[in-house]
Image (cartoon, rainbow, N blue to C red):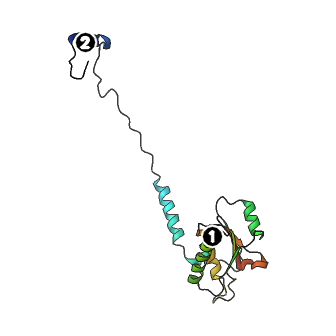
Amino acid sequence: MGPDSQASDEDIALFREAVGTVRPVRPDVLPIERPRPEPIPVQARLETQRVLQESLSRRPEDDEVETGEELLYSAPGVGPEVLRRLRRGQLSMQGRLDLHGMSVPEAKDAVARFLYTSRSRGLRSVLIIHGKGLGSHQKRPVLKGKLNQWLARRAEVLAFCSARGVDGGTGAVYVLLRR
């Protein structure tokens, strides 16, 4: 049978015989159930936003670091053995930056340039000397606290820690960079 042909009476009778008795389906017999939407954790979202906003609006004086305090940071995934070797000064320092005498804006710019240059040259471990703050106006380490914040926020930094005494102690940091 082609698309233009009509069914004969005989075809219709055969079809009805094959199908048998039929009755219409009432729409209210088969209710359509829609899946419920996932609950929205409104309070959890608000708390996350509050914590994020608070972390972004912290004042520098909230993060003061004392002269003798050791700095230590490692990004997720850095193994304890790598961090242990860094802390012991067992990694060869391939670059060095001295921030003595720089203002905070100068130091921030110098650190950013140094990290970029070091990474582009393929260096893995570098030393940054920030000083102990003995020459600062307040006789406190201003750059130490700032450097702690800057390094922890940099994607290319895998880990950092205060250096051993021979390399500057708590006045310097060893920094491990991503490949």
Q: Position of residue 175 (x, y in %)?
A: 68, 71
Q: Are marks 1 and 2 in contact (CB under 8 Å)?
A: no
Q: Secondary structure at mark 1?
A: helix
Q: Give whichever of 169, 30 is nearer the camera.
A: 169
Q: Give whichever of 176, 141 is nearer the camera.
A: 176
* Res. 27 mark: none
Q: Amino acid at mark 1?
A: Arg
Residue 2 appears in view: yes
Task: Write down the quadrant of residue 86 in the picture.
Answer: bottom right
Tell me which numbered mark, 1 or 2, is placed earlier along the sequence.
Answer: 2
What residue is shown with label 1?
119
What residue is shown with label 2?
11
Specify whether 84 is left or right of 42: right
Q: Give whichever of 11, 138 is nearer the camera.
A: 11
Q: Position of residue 81 (x, y in %)?
A: 75, 61
Residue 64 appears in view: no
Location of residue 11 with respect to 151 vertically, above or below: above
Near mark 2 (Cα within 10 A), the count class, few <14, some 14-19 or many ≥20, is few
Location of residue 15 with respect to 119 vertically, above or below: above
Residue drawn at x 70%, y 78% as measured from the top left: 172
Task: Write down the quadrant of residue 79 in the picture.
Answer: bottom right
Q: Give whichever of 43, 127 is nearer the camera.
A: 127
Residue drawn at x 63%, y 77% as measured from the top left: 145
Specify whether 43 is left or right of 2: right
Q: Position of residue 4 (x, y in %)?
A: 21, 22
Near mark 1 (Cα within 10 A), the count class, few <14, some 14-19 or many ≥20, is some
Specify whether 127 is left or right of 154: right
Q: Secondary structure at mark 2?
A: helix
Q: CA distance from mark 1 to mark 2?
A: 82 Å
